[in-house]
Image: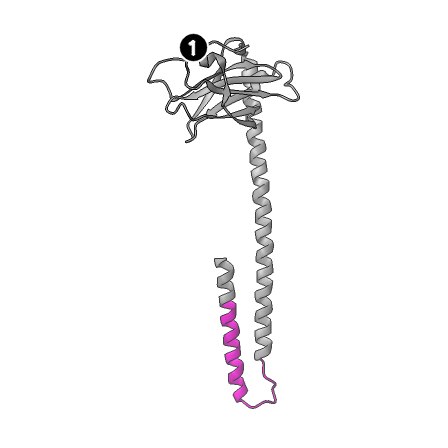
Amino acid sequence: MTDQTPFPQIAKEPRLYGVVDVLRADRVAGWVIDRTDAARCATVELRREGRLIATMTANRPRKDLERQAVGTGSYGFAFTFDPPLEEGMEFTVAVTAVSHDGVALLLQPVGAAAKPISAEKKALGRILAELADLRADVGTLRQDAASAEENRARFQERLEFVQLRLEGGISAAEPPRSEPGWLAGVAVVGALLAIGSLALALFSLWSG
C-alpha cells in the first residue's frame, strides 16, 4: 500500500524531504520529515484545483520509516476525500509540506501514485488553479468593498454630527436685533467657538 522508497542520506539535500505514495480518487497519503529537527513534525497543506481544502500535521506512525530508522518514524499523513474525486481528476491535487518556520516543499507522487499526466491535463490543471486564484481575488474585493461601505457610512454619520454641532453653535450665537450692541461681541465669540469646535471635530474625524 505504501511506497518503500529509501530515505536519501545526502547531507546537502533540502531540509524537508517527503513523498506522496498514495494518490487515489478517495485518498491521499505520504510522509515528510524536517532533516534539521527530527523531533518536529511538518504541516501538510492539501489543495485541490488550487484551493486549500485541508491542513494536517505529518505525525502518523509509518512502519516503513521505522524499519529504515528514519527519525522517530512518525512522519506520515493521510486524507480521505469525501465525496471522492471525479474519475481521473487526481492530477488536480497538490500536497505541500511546510516547516515550523515557513520553509515549503511541494511533495511529488512516487511509485503507483506517480501516474503520467498528459499535456491536456496539465493545461487543465493550470486553468483550474487560475480560476481558484480569481475566486480568491473576487472574495478579497468583496471584503474590501464591504469595509469601504462601512467606513463611508461611519464618515457620513460623523459629518452629520459635525454639521449639527455647527448649526447649533451658530444659532446660539445669533443675538436678537433689539438687544444692546455688546451682544454682538458675544455673538462673535460664540461664532468663533463654533468654528473652533468644527475644526476640532474635523481633526478628530480625519485622525480617527
Amino acid on which disc 1 is placed: Pro
| Residue 86 figure quarter | top right
User: How many numbered callouts?
Assistant: 1
- The x and y percentages for residue 151 are 57, 52
Magenta stretch, main secondary structure class = helix
Foreground pick, 199 / 6 = 6
| Magenta-colored span | 174-199
- The x and y percentages for residue 132 are 57, 28
Q: Is residue 43 above or below residue 207?
A: above
Q: Which residue matches tag 1?
A: 6
Foreground pick, 62 / 173 = 62
User: Callout 1: helix, strand or loop?
Assistant: loop
Residue at image position (50%, 76%) is 192
Asked if the stretch drawn in magenta spans residue 180, the answer is yes
Q: Is residue 106 above or below residue 203?
A: above
- The x and y percentages for residue 63 are 49, 13
Q: Does residue 106 appear left or right of residue 142 in this picture?
A: left
Whether residue 124 is visible to the viewer of this picture, yes or no, is no
Asked if the stretch drawn in magenta spans residue 190, the answer is yes
Residue at image position (62%, 17%) is 26
Residue at image position (57%, 47%) is 147
Query: Local crowd at mark 1 within 10 Å, few (<14), some, or many (≥20)?
Result: few
The way the protein has been coloured in the rendering is one colour
Query: Which image quarter is the N terminus in?
Result: top right
